[in-house]
Each structure stands twice: as structure tokens, then as C-alpha cells.
Amino acid sequence: MSTVSETTHDGAVAVGALAAPSADEGLSPAQLAAKYGLTVSGARPGLAEYTRQLWGRRHFINEFAKARTAAQYTQARLGQLWQVMTPLLNAAVYYLIFGLLIGTSKGIDNFIAYLVTGIFIFTFTQNSVMAGVRAVAGNLGLIRALHFPRASMPVALTLMQLQQLMMSMFVLIAIVLMTGEVPDASWILIIPALITQWIFNTGLAMIMARLGSKMTDLAQLMPFILRTWMYTSGVMYSISNLTAHAPHYVRILLDVNPAAVYIDLMRFALIDSVTSAQLPPHIWASAVGWAVLVGVGGYIYFWKAEESYGRG
């Protein structure tokens, strides 16, 4: 009997303890999270903190870019030579069609250097855009497995394109020298021209990365958009010669085209016959303006969707 009463008494105590009101009763999920120091997994940090985290991944970004560069042509017998051969073959085709058949070389001194420079510089932007489109959608496994600022992917891929361009620049400079150009002080302008273009390309890649993460067909559409952009950027012709009798607003639209701006700056740096008189007014202001506008704007635009990448 005593055992039963003790058991009953203990059970009553246990039931009474369970029935006691909890200290967390009545608190909302947000209040509970604040009370216990819980945060949302993968929540977007503030812009300053996000930038700090991205800077902390700079070594990963650099090594990832190197690894992707080394692996890109592993299946091809000529390997990394295709980084140079692809724009050179494009230049040969465009020289045949536009320089010889259509005659856009008329009125342009040293058309070969003029054309090859345009091809190499536009290819840098073109490849950066295509890499940006696939930056998130093509790396979902890595994005879902590890926690890191997602902006690391488009930044690394545009850095990869810059590294490839730097290797191609040796070939470009060799061609320019073979066509009779002589190095002078203006060649120093290659550095700021490439830096501003890379910032512009990175911002544009971030915009395309966010769009490409949601629009799966964008990668199929972009080659047509980029081809149209190339034909309006003066890659294989002189914009000033072609628009000599065009309406003024057409000339302005073509002159402020960012791809044309960076191509003109590189031609001015490398080719003596391209003088400042042939460049659009305030071209350096345009180059820096596009870099700041698209670079910063693209970064913020990408950051705002940080929580959505790799989900769904």
C-alpha cells in the first residue's frame, strides 16, 4: 500500500510539474529567437559586413579563378592556346568579311591592329557576361554545400577572364608591333583602361548572375544579344566614319556605348593613328562613370538577392 501511495504521489508531482506554465509561453517566434540568440540560416548580412566577408574570401576567389582557368581547356589537345586562338580566328574571319569584302577598312590606318584590338577587348566583356549568367546556376552544388558570399562566384569568374586577357595581351601586343606600331608613353594607359573595364565587367556579371539564377533560358538568349552589341560597338569599323552623316543622337548613343568606350581607349593607347581628336568627348569620364555605375550598382543588385541563391 505504501508503495502504491508513493507512486501515486510521485505521479501527481510529475503531472503537476509538467502542467506548470513555461517561461517561453506566449512569446512569438521572433521573441524566442531574440531570447536565445538564434538567427536565420543564410540570412543576408548588411552591405558593409557582406563586403568584409567577401574581402575575407579573396584568396578563395583567386585560387578558384586559377583552377577554372587551368581546367577550362583540359579536354582540348591544344589546351590553353585556345584562349588566344579563339579571338585570333574571329579576327581573321571578320577581317575577311568586313575588311576585304565589305570594305570597312577604308579610312582606317593599320586596320589589322585596329580590328584585333577591338576583338580582344570586346571578347573580354562578352566572356565575362556569359560567365556571369552561369555563375550561380552552374555552381549550385558548391553554393548549397558551403556558406560564403555568393558574389564570390561572379567576381572569381570575371577575374578568370581578366587573367585570360592578360595572357592574350602578349599576342595582341606582338601583332600591334608587327603592324608597325612603336611603344610610347600612351601604352601606360592600358592599365587604367583594363582596370575600369574589369570593374564594369564584374558589375555586369553580377547583374547577369542574379538574372541567370532565375531565368534558366537566359544563357541561350545571351549569344544573340551579345552579337548585336558587338555589331554596334565599332569592333570591326570606325564609329566616327560610319556615323559621319547620321543623326546626332545616333552618334551620341554609339559613342557612350560602354563596350565602344573601352575599345576606343585601348586603341588610343596602342595605335598611333588613333588620336584624341577621333575619340568621343569626355571618354575617360565615360569609362570611369560606367565602371562606377555598373560596378557598384551590379554589386548592390546582386547582394539584395543573396538569400535566394541556391534555394528552390
Image (cartoon, grey):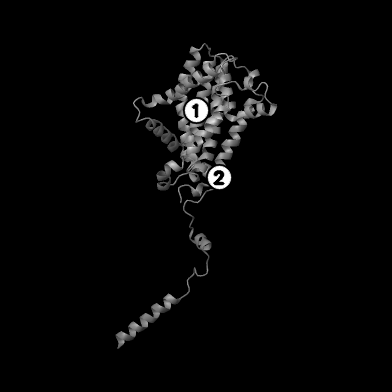
* Mark linked to residue 79: none
Estimate the x, y position of residue 19 in percent, counting from the top left.
44, 76
* Residue 68 seen in render: yes
Count neighbours of disc 1 (C-alpha within 10 A) and say few if under 14, some if 14 to 19, many if 20 or more.
many
* Mark linked to residue 47: 2
* Earlier sequence position, callout 2 versus callout 1: 2
Left or right relative to 72: residue 34: right
Q: Residue at x 54, y 40 (%)?
A: 207
Q: Hey, which quadrant is residue 257 in on the image?
A: top right
Count neighbours of disc 2 (C-alpha within 10 A) and say few if under 14, some if 14 to 19, many if 20 or more.
few
Q: Which residue is mark 1?
A: 123
Q: Residue at x 50, y 46 (%)?
A: 214
Left or right relative to 172: residue 240: right
Residue type at numbered disc 2? Leu
Residue type at numbered disc 1? Thr
Estimate the x, y position of residue 208 in percent, counting from the top left.
52, 39
Work out whether residue 67 or residue 267 is closer to the camera in this orientation and state it: 267
Estimate the x, y position of residue 67 in percent, counting from the top left.
39, 33
